[in-house]
Amino acid sequence: MSLWYAICDVIPLEMLQWDFMRNAFLAIVIMSPLFGLMSTMIVTGRMSFFSDALGHSAFTGIAIGCICGAAAPTWIAVAFSVAFALLFSYVRSRSNHTADTLIGVFSSTAVALGIFIATLGGGSFTKYNTYLIGDILSVTPSEIGTLALVLLAVVIFWVFYSNQLTLTAIHPQLASSRGIPIHLSQCIFTTAIAVVVTLSISSVGLLILNSLLVLPAAAARNIARNLKQYHLFSVLSALVAGLAGLIISYYLGSSAGAAISLTLALIFAVSFFFRKVRA
């Protein structure tokens, strides 16, 4: 972190005089490409609402961890979310229901279970508010290190599986005929989403986390002419919105997660306008 702090010393931004802002700035630099890459996989795979359902399952895992007195409930939430994702993949592969129906079933069950556990025995719900709204200013160096490792894993996953996931989403029969293990790819994909969502929930907030996993790719899809541009524009959109949102939240005293989400919405609107102009 000392090297990063030295870099921040030469960046002409007033907010970087504070260590907590430097940590938040680095977290955004790491999380933005993470969200950008995951967004392309989620939008292409038509799993936009699944990430929201995983957020609900992560909240349930955190509630379970707090009830059990765990020192780090986030890791219990990660385990619960991964189990939730794998169970969803299993049921989806053996059911004739559409994906959106199953997502609705799992999402409503997860949020109901989370609220039930959080309020069990008359417990107060207020201690969970930070997970609903998020607070990236409280991110710690250890959490940043974990996010960096997750980013590395997602990049490796993207390099080896992005083409397979794209083909599976567009034409699953063709993917299967080419020997692509569809169910295995989907399990790995849903597990990756579960880990990213759970580790980001305390920084970004459950209420707006899904927008950060959908809007970057949605904006990129408006203007990208090929798959390479699609991934590049998604990552750039997430990075620009992340940095701009953090700066806006600092000077206006607002939620960083909400500012980032609104900036992404603005980028989507602009990209949609240029799509119409180009058409």
Image: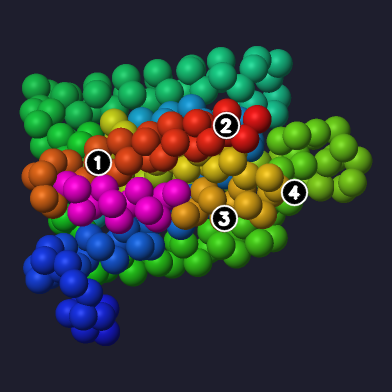
Q: Is residue 9 above or below residue 116?
A: below
Task: Give the Cα distance between marks 2 and 4.
Answer: 33 Å
According to the image, label 2 marks what residue? Answer: 277
Q: Nearer the viewer, mark 2 or mark 4?
A: 2
The image quarter in which residue 54 lies:
top left
Dot 1 or dot 4, earlier in sequence? 4
Residue 116 colored in magenta in the image: no
Residue 164, disc: 4
Q: Which residue is mark 1?
A: 259
- Dot 3 or dot 1: first in sequence order is 3
Q: Residues within 10 Å of mark 1 (few under 14, many from 20)?
A: many
In the structure shown, which secondary structural element does the residue marked by tag 4 occupy?
A: helix
- In the rendered image, which quarter is residue 25 located in? bottom left
What secondary structure is the magenta-colored segment mainly? helix
Q: Secondary structure at mark 1?
A: helix
Say which label, 4 or 3, has the lower sequence index: 4
Name which residue type carries label 3. Leu
Can residue 42 be seen by looking at this rendering?
A: no
Pair 1/2: label in front:
2
Ranked by sequence position, the earlier of labels 2 and 3 is 3
Query: Magenta segment range?
Result: 237-249
Dot in front, 4 or 3: 3
